[in-house]
Each structure stands twice: as C-alpha cells, then as structure tokens.
Image (tube, rainbow, N blue to C red):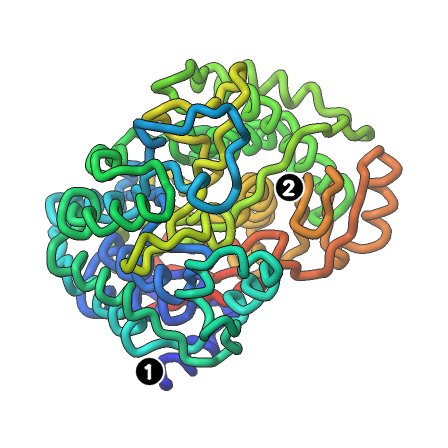
Amino acid sequence: MPTRLFAEASAARGALARSSQGMVTSPHELASEAGREVLRAGGNAIEAAIAINATLCVTYPHFCGLGGDAFMIVSDPQGATITLSGIGQAAAKLPNDGRPIPVRGPGSAITAAAAVDTWEQAFTFSQRAWGGRKSWKELFQRAIAYATDGFPLTPSQRFWADFRGKEIGDWPDVVRVFTAEGRIPDVGETFRQPDLARTLTMLAENGGRDFYEGELARRIARGLEQAGSPLTADDLARCRARNESALRVPYRGGELISLRPPTQGITTLEIMGVLDRFDVAAIREGSADYYHLLVEAVKRAFIDRNRFVADPDFAEVPVDRLLSPAHLDGLARSIDPRRAAPWPHVFKTGDTVFIGAADRDGNCVSLLQTVYFDWGSGVVAGDTGILWHNRGAAFSVEPGSINVLRPGKRPFHTLNPGMYLKDGRPRLLYGTQGADGQPQTLAAVLTRLIDYGMDPLTALARPRFLLGKTFSDSRDSLKLELDAGQAVFEDLTARGHAISPIPAQSPLAGHPGAIRIEDDGRFVGAHDPRSDGVALGL
C-alpha cells in the first residue's frame, strides 16, 4: 500500500489542482494516482483514463465495475473529437411473461456490459492517432495490485453497504464478495478481491475482447447462466461500443458537446441551449432567480427526453429538431420567470463515476462509467468477481413506451460526460454521478464555470438542487441544499416550487468533477468535495 501517495492524495482532496503538464480527476484518490502515474511515465490521456477506470473497478465497486457500461468523449488539442458510446444490448432471448423488470437480481442482469470494449476501442485509437506509448497490460498494474493486496475501504463503499444493509442479505453474491463473512468491513479496513484480481490479469494478458469472445467470456457467461440471467456467450460476443460523432450546441461563444441517444446527452445540451437564450451572468448566482431559471429549463428538456430519447435503432429520435434554434427559442419563451411549471414526471435513480484526463500535449478524455444502481444487479458472474449491472431495469414493459424492452435493444442511459470547446479547442472536461440528477448538476456546474467564471473547486462546492424523488424522499419535489439560504427557499416556494431541503454538501447532489484548460495551456481541476475524489496534476 503506497502510504506516501495515499497521504499526498488525501491532502489534495477538496483542493484546487494546478499543473502545466497534465491532470486527472476521479472519485477515488488511488485511481487518480494511477492515472497520474501513467501521465508521468509519458502516457497519454486515453491511457491514463483506462488506468483510472480499471482501478475504480476495484476501489469503488459499489458504483463502478467491469460488468457495466462506459462513455467517452475524446479530443485532441485542435478539437477533433470522437465519442465512444459503450452500451450493452438486451439479451437475444428474453423472458416473455409481461411482468415488470426487477431492479435487482438475475432478472435485472439482462443487458451485456460494454465498458471493456469501450476501453479497448479507445486504446486502439490512442495507438493509431496519438502514438500511444503504454502497453495495454501496463494500464492494469495498479488495479491488479489493489485487487490482490487490498486497499483501505472507502467511506463511500461503507455508506452504500450500510444504506442497503436490509437488502444486502438478499444478494448472496454481494455478501460473498463484498463483505467479510457477512460483516460489512470498516472504513480503512484492507479489502481484497482475489477473484477480480485473476479476471483483471486475464484481461491484461489477453486483451479486451477476451471479455466477450475468449476464455473469460465463457466463464462470465457460465456464471450469469448459473445465476439465472438470460445473457449468453453469443450476447457477449455481439457487444460493441459505438464510435459516433458528437452532438453539439452553441453556448456563450463556444460549443458544448455530448453523446448521442440513447444517452441523455441531448437533454443536457437542450438545457444549456435554453439557458444560452438568457443573460445568466446578469442574474445573481445562487439567488432564487438563478435556481428558478435552471429548474424550469430542466423541466422542459426532461419532458422532451421522456417523450423521445431511446435507442435510435428501434425508435425515431428527432435529434436535429430538439437542438434546433427554433425549438430552443420556444422552450425559452415558455419559461415564466415568476411561476414554476408543474412537475408530475417520474425520477430515475442511478450511480456512476466521472473520470477526466488531460495530457501535456493537450489531448483530453471525459469519461463516465457505471453499474447503474449502487451495487448494480447484485449478481456476480460466477468466480470472476465481476458485479453485473442492472441497466436493463431502465427498460419498460409497457407496449407503448419508447423504451419498451426488445431483444438486442440498448436501454435509455442517463450517462452523459461532456466537453466545452472555445475557439475550436477543448476548454472544459466535466461529468457527474447521479442518473436523472446529471443534467441538473451539470447545468449548475457549467453556468458557474462559464457564465460566472468560477474556478472548478468553487463551482463544484456551491449549493445544488435535484428535481424529483431521492433515495430518502419519495416526493417529486425540488430538493435544494440548505446552504442556498432561507430567503431562497421562501422565494422559490412563493413561485410554486414544492421545496424539500437536503443537507449542505449532500451526496444526493451528485459527485461531479471538472478540469479547465486555460488559454496558456495550464490545467486547473477539482473533484466534488462531497465525494472521496481528487484531482491531481503532474
């Protein structure tokens, strides 16, 4: 256990990182250090991001894992971007009983997991386009070491194990792999995952497609079948991340970019496109006027999202119309500055990790990875140590739903990492945990970074809101952190918002990270002080 590095990273948590040579940010200090180590050894941003993500699959297993999906935006210094949308498709043979999809157990483990293929495609691009210097195997060294030798259990892992304490007993795989003979480990206690260490070693030695077509794939498929999942070896073999052009919307003389449906990247872009129609900087940041405008923009974009966003292979998604100036103009005009629109819409939960990386050459990566709910499906694939996600629970069984379950279909996905380009060059890397909260959190973070010129740490630490249900409050109310102030609560209530206070610096408000690239090429970054995360510069 590298105690010096751990102490250094712990001291950096909640601090603003600065560097002229490169930077990484993630929700766990050991993962961030793994990425910085790659950059320091001459690796590029993609290589660092893969090393970070692999490490998080070990050190943040409740939010992140090999059995999940992943999304990347990649850019070179000149703003040439690609996106990798790693969404596992539904099994080819599904239960046909018409019952609702369970949110846990083998009945929720019904989609393949595309994270590893996302990494491999990004790595191949890095080798071809950026002259990558690191071997695939090198990027897994830290992850394998922490899975084998252990790491200090995080407050976040302990919190979410305690939070699900009444349910975990019904998830035998979680008990077997993530507890100490039924006891939830203490914060700081050394936590090992020997099965996952062997799996990571196989991936490192055999390449990413071993997860889908090799010996590892056969072990995964066998474990899932024994658990009762409908996924097969053929389903794994068909799983591929997609290399797609980014979606774009103008904002304050620059351009925000995100991923295509079935992600809700289009939703974040709609919100920001609406806000671009207002002089946000003229509104006092943190005032009732500020929160009201952001919440009302969120509502309008969410209505479009719930109506249109699905897998374009199975449904027509009018991307161009939703991001058109005429449509955004209309949404902006519909906002009443003194009155809240009603909000009867269903909220979706989920948990995720954000990773940002920028190298000394100016190459950038913005990445999100997830197992959907904390602890995913609760199903571990046999003896692989791989916790499978439950993203299939995002499907509907209602025949008229745009996201109705179909064989081979990709589910609606809340993940949407982003970048902001100015003068055609990357200027901000950003993303957050939080499912439905992601576009809401990003609206607050981006306005504070761009419109108010805040540094990343200040922007991330300011009070945030969450419209809809939460784990602890089933009302479809507007959750707002208490440090927004009593006057703001009273003003928003008078405008018709149903307000529910949540504690200041609440984990419910998301765990975003951000890296700003200054005009002179220097990097400034932070990870949310609500998280265990840290940004580290070279």
Residue 329 pos. (x, y %): 60, 18
Crowd band around label 1 with a 10 angstrom C-alpha radius: few (<14), some (14–19), many (20+): few
In depth, the one of 249 and 212 nearer the eye is 212
Residue sitting nearer the eye, 246 or 239: 239
On residue 281, the disc is 2
Q: Give the quadrant of the N terminus.
A: bottom left
Q: Answer with left or right where residue 22 lies relative to residue 450.
A: left
Residues at circles 1 and 2 in contact by the CB criterion of under 8 Å: no
Q: Is residue 403 left or right of residue 259?
A: right
Q: Residue at x 20, y 47 (%)?
A: 217
Residue highlighted by disc 1: 1
- Counting from the top left corner in percent of width and height, residue 301 is at 59, 27
Which residue is at 45% across, 40% downward?
A: 108
Helix, strand or loop for disc 1: loop
Q: Quadrant of residue 165?
A: bottom right
219 or 239, which lies in front?
219
Kindly identify the amino acid type of the residue bearing the numbered disc 1. Answer: Met
In 3D space, how far apart are the residues under numbered discs 1 and 2 (Cα atoms)?
47 Å
Task: Give the side of residue 291 with respect to residue 227, left or right.
Answer: right
Instruction: Say above or below: 211 vs 423.
Output: below
Image position, residue 47 (x, y; %): 22, 56
Q: Residue furthest bottom?
A: 4
Q: Earlier in the sequence, mark 1 or mark 2?
A: 1
Disc marking residue 481: none
- For image coordinates 41% across by 46% down, the residue present is 389
Residue 172 visible in the shown view:
yes
